[in-house]
Amino acid sequence: MRVLFLFLLAGCLTTSCTKLKDREKVKPDLLAIMDEEDEFYNIFTTQTPAVSGTDGPYELGTKFKATQLGQITQIRYYKTSGETGTHTGRIWSAAGTVLASVTFTGETASGWQTATLSTPYETTVNTVYVVTVNSNTEYGATSNGLENVVTNGPLSTIVGANGVFGTTLGAFPTGTYHSTNYFRDVTFEVLPDISAPTTPDSVTVTENYAYGLDLSWKPSTDNVIVTGYNVYNDTVLLASVYGTWANIYGLTPSTPYSIKVRARDAAGNLSVASTAINITSGSTSSGLRGWQIDSTNAGLTGKGIDKGTLPLYTGGRIPRGSTISMKKIVDLDVSEGNIIIDRCWIVSTASNGWPVGSTEGAVLIKDSHIEGSGGLGSYAAHPQQTPLDKDVTFLRVVVSIQGGGFSFGGASIVRNCLINNLPGDGGDPSGEGNHVDGGTRRIGTAQLNVIDSHIDVRSAGNNATGAFMIQPTYGFIDNILLRGNLFGGGGYVISAGNYTPEGGPTRYYGDHIYIDNNRFYSGPAYGYISTQGAALGGWTNNYVNNSANTDNKGTVITYP
């Protein structure tokens, strides 16, 4: 059943509207969507009972939850042809408190029966409820009908101890038998979410450096769910992020900023802005450049931590919103998103790319060490982010003893990282056809910033592809900034090339790729950069590395 929102809104304007009862004032733009349709859902759609039972009477119920804001308007149950007597429907909390009830009238001899609540009951998102209706003489049932989750729109059943019964009518039922579905149901109406999240608190600048800021804050709350945060310079949007932190890049050095943060929810509601932090961004000489990064100031050693002393993390998949510190983590699982990994030793047993991002929220890994599982590894082993993953940030991370440094396809920042000791295919640095990449950009169009990092794959020999590879193997690639890094490679240090799979068509990289103010170790076998004839967005201030000179500037490297 679907009802025009225009009709319901007219009712609100002439009388009172239970839909908006106890809510904040309606947003001004709500009228703009009044022609949208409201949505009503039942748990069960085409399902009907497999058998009927006569061993009653019972109080029979179903556990369920809703993933969207809404209200229960009706209670339903499936009536078998032999059932008689009065029936009362009830909505219970998971703990057994009656929240709403209604007596059925005008029932038919069999089939679905519906009773409308006098006042709709507004539910809380992702909270378990129980709907019950008594049986007097007969009831319909399907054994194991709730063994697996049943989902319809925002409604879903609960797996485990579901399909509940009790022998006292009107009492909260707790018995279960073979996950039996007794066909007790509700009608659920999705409501517009007009409540904004709470204001982010304790916004703190954790680092201020040339071109950027690192920020953190306490999480906001929402009546449904906070989906992310917007960071502003006063009213100008700087970034939209998915965790309780932001690594802002692209600021103008030595410039005043007024930083504010607003939380957002799935409906697009924005919180009140946080108290402004007025700060001047760092000068162009602030912060460490890539040619200043080594094992003494990156990774665990940079924090004075012996990785061998860290206790093993045994929690499995890391819960959403967690910060994991000072642990050894084998085969990292950050799929829940909105996770910070701090001062950890991350060991992968994978022989191929392994996920370091999440579609559910941002991932920040800082002051940590990532490596293979003790052996030299294979070329394919590397931390990998897909284009659908939310923000991934590597901050002062060491990556070693793997074939590849990283392969990022979504929005990401790699800053002050050390990527070296990558052994290549089969662990043989002198083998023919080695293909070792310090960092690859294979898929995606979101911004990738590799800044102030030290990426050196020379240990893999002159057959190595290079320190950074731009390869549109799976589709168009664009939006890359390489700035302030020290690169070392064996073949071409930076390799950018279009790709034509067998049968075509050719896949291209774009012209928003900027390589600025980097240093390169001398002596690559083929050259400092290969573009295969296509144009980059910019190549400026790149030099051969010479530690004897100011700012490590040696011979200027001209654009090929």
Image: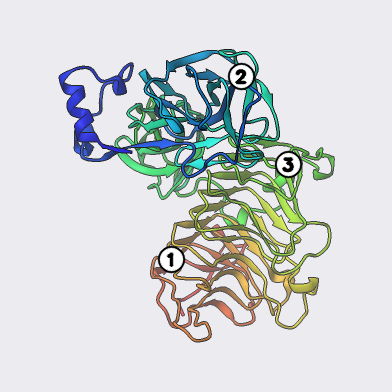
Task: Tell me the element at label 3.
Answer: loop
Does residue 284 appear in this view?
yes
| Residue 407 drawn above or below residue 228 | below
Disc 1 residue type? Asp
Does residue 28 appear in this view?
no
Which label sits on residue 57?
Answer: 2
Task: Tell me the element at label 2.
Answer: loop
Indicate how the structure is coloured in the image: rainbow
Front of the two marks 2 and 3? 2
Residue 176: % across, % down: 68, 27
Considering depth in this image, is 505 or 259 the residue closer to the camera? 505
**Residue at which label 3 appears:** 316
Residue 322: % across, % down: 62, 34
- Distance, label 3 to label 1, CA atoms, is 35 Å
Disc 3 residue type? Gly
Residue 318 quadrant: top right
